[in-house]
Image (cartoon, rainbow, N blue to C red):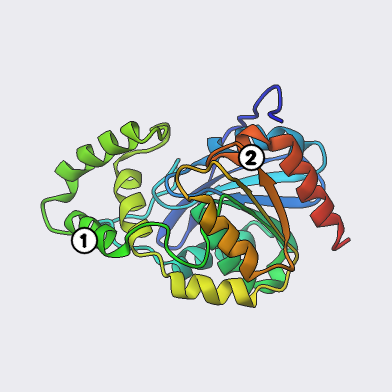
Amino acid sequence: MQPETPRDPPRHRLELPGVTLSYTDEGSGPVVVALSGLPGAHHHWRWLATPVFSWARFIRLELPGFGEARLPGPVRPLTLQARGELVARALERLGLDDVSLVGHSMGGLIALEVAAHHARAVRTVTLVATPGPTPHYPEAVWRAFAGLFLLPGLQQPLTRVARFAYRRLGFSLRDMHDEGAVRTIVDAAHTDFGRHRQNIAAVRQPVLQAWADDDDLVPSRFHHELARARPDWTHLTFADGKHDVQKFHGVELAEAMRRLQQRRA
């Protein structure tokens, strides 16, 4: 069920050495930190935020390439490990520990990275439409395509091609500046699924995995593959919702997250 109204609080900037992150912060209670996918920014959580706000402090963290987050210099691949380290540094700077992480799509991989390697900071993990242990796209093709964006002189003209492709695929271009358009392709193509598989096996916190069987970006067989890899996790499946369960089923998802969080109370 979709909440009646979304929440769109103002963003704040978080300066870390060599990088600027951005985030929103609202509510009180147990801390829930949301990590967007690629592409993704704080507004992708605007529907889930309303029901979560009723019982938790909800923080939406934006990583380089999206919203007001910036990483100076030419775009180079930002690894899963590097993204996890950025999240861990942000949590430390904000004085947060024992947080419940919720990650959408690629944000779920980052959430598992943080939970596996910075376990003391993480209470629970919720995965929303998160890819499974094997790639859901042809890696070699994506690597070759992404490599063009790393060639001198091609990044700027190819950015226009990327933005056109996102629009045709149905992605919102809100908060997607040129860095985000390029970074989505480059970082997605260089995702380390071997490390992702290690993180899936290593995580010991309670985990909720939620997906829709009509997901048109990550086919349902990859979600079921992830569920089979960790049958001890809590699994929440919807018939519809495509790649945006947090939007169309925000009420049910928020309640499942609350129950998961209470397991560690």
- Mark 1: secondary structure: helix
Q: Nearer the viewer, mark 1 or mark 2?
A: 2
Residue closest to the eye, 141 or 258: 141
- Mark 2: secondary structure: loop
Nearer-N-terminus badge (1/2): 1
Q: Residue at x 26, y 65 (%)?
A: 140
**Label 1 belongs to which residue?**
144
Residue 217 percent location from the top left of the image:
45, 46
- Residues at marks 1 and 2, CA–CA distance in whole angstroms: 34 Å
Q: Residues within 10 Å of mark 2 (few under 14, many from 20)?
A: few
Q: Residue at x 22, y 55 (%)?
A: 145
The residue at the far top in this view is 4
Q: Report the label total.
A: 2
Looking at numbered disc 2 in the image, what kind of residue is underneath it? Ala
Residue 108 percent location from the top left of the image:
56, 57
Q: Residues within 10 Å of mark 1 (few under 14, many from 20)?
A: few
| Residue 187, above or below 49 | below
Residue closest to the eye, 136 or 99: 136
Looking at numbered disc 1 in the image, what kind of residue is underneath it? Ala
Q: Residue at x 31, y 57 (%)?
A: 186
**Label 2 belongs to which residue?**
239
Q: Answer with the quarter of the image where residue 138 lies.
A: bottom left
Q: In which quadrant of the rendered image does the N terminus lie?
A: top right
The residue at the far right in this view is 265
Residue 66 percent location from the top left of the image:
43, 44
